[in-house]
Image (tube, rainbow, N blue to C red):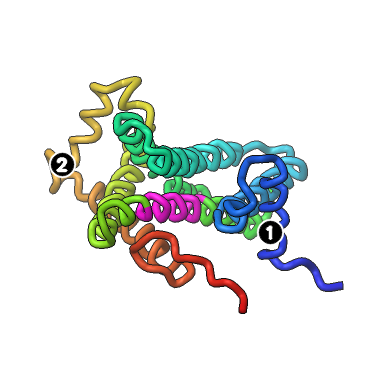
Amino acid sequence: MTPPQPRTLASHVARYLASLGALSAEEAKESPLPRLALMSLFAIALLAARVVCTHSTAYKFLAWNLFLAWIPFALGLAVERFVAARAHSALVAAAALAWLLFLPNAPYIVTDLIHIRFRQEAPLWFDAVMLMAFAWTGLTLGVASLRRLAGVVASRWGLGLARVFVVTVAGLSGYGIYLGRFARLNSWDLAAHPGWAARELLEPVAHPVAMAQAWNVTLTQAALFLMIYLTDQGRTFGPPAPRSRPE
């Protein structure tokens, strides 16, 4: 018996989400949510298997980081629906700002690869696969979220501005990844500790030569995020491409 293909599994997830009322039947067909949920379940399953087999919770932070990676995707959906419902501009702006602040959490998981090292309780190859699964899921969540917001920008202000939007957001996300990994700044610190957060935020700008690492990390992470965005299913800068219908 031939095992089900990934697309078939994703379609099962889509139908399940539609049955729960989380998505309409049409949204379930078009949304990346089913495949993102499938990827997340796979990553969590690897982590759970490691915990059960080794009784070690050394990588439990991956589950938290994956949860944080889902937040910008959820906020992006909220922005999209607010715009479609012609909600008050202040509500749209607040949701969009929150989305921008949390977006770096998605590609940030790539930096968790620094934790790959030999540990006696588990094979190195397994830990590498597990960390890659989380990193790829985070990147895909970020790309899917950015693509939907780029679609909103393109529909309202044109494809040219959407391209500028994508490049700008990729750059800001790269900077956010640096702040999270090296300055240990969280998305919510701007509200919880505004003074300290502002100092950490502006230090690389005030001392660009001394803080060269900040710009190296920013540019590298932004380039990676942008390349994944551009090569995702062969798409370009614009809004989500329409799905082709079988003839």
Q: Does the magenta run of residues contain 99?
A: no
Q: Residues within 10 Å of mark 1 (few under 14, many from 20)?
A: some
Label ID, residue 109: none
Quarter of the image where the C terminus is located:
bottom right
- Find disc 1 in the rendering and name its residue: 11
Residue depicted at x 70% and y 40%: 20
Quarter of the image where the N terminus is located:
bottom right
The one of 121 and 19 positioned closer to us in this rendering: 19
The one of 98 and 21 positioned closer to us in this rendering: 21
Check the image and name the residue furthest to the right.
Answer: 1
Of the numbered discs 2 and 1, the one sitting upstream in the chain is 1
Judge whether residue 120 can be spotted in this image: no
Q: Which amino acid does label 2 sit on?
A: Val
Q: What stretch is highlighted in magenta?
A: 138-151
Q: Residues within 10 Å of mark 2 (few under 14, many from 20)?
A: few
Dominant SS in magenta: helix
Contact, mark 2 vs mark 1 (Cβ under 8 Å): no
Residue depicted at x 67% and y 58%: 10
Check the image and name the residue furthest to the front.
Answer: 86
Residue depicted at x 67% and y 46%: 17
Residue 44 coordinates in the image, percent (x, y): 66, 46
SS class, disc 2:
helix
Q: Does the magenta run of residues contain 140?
A: yes
- Find disc 2 in the rendering and name its residue: 205
Q: Quadrant of residue 100?
A: top left
Residue 121 coordinates in the image, percent (x, y): 69, 46
Residue 106 coordinates in the image, percent (x, y): 45, 46
SS class, disc 1:
helix
The one of 35 and 152 positioned closer to us in this rendering: 152
Q: What residue type is labelled 1?
A: Ser
The one of 123 and 215 positioned closer to us in this rendering: 215
- Report how far apart the C-alphas of labels 2 and 1 lie in the structure: 46 Å
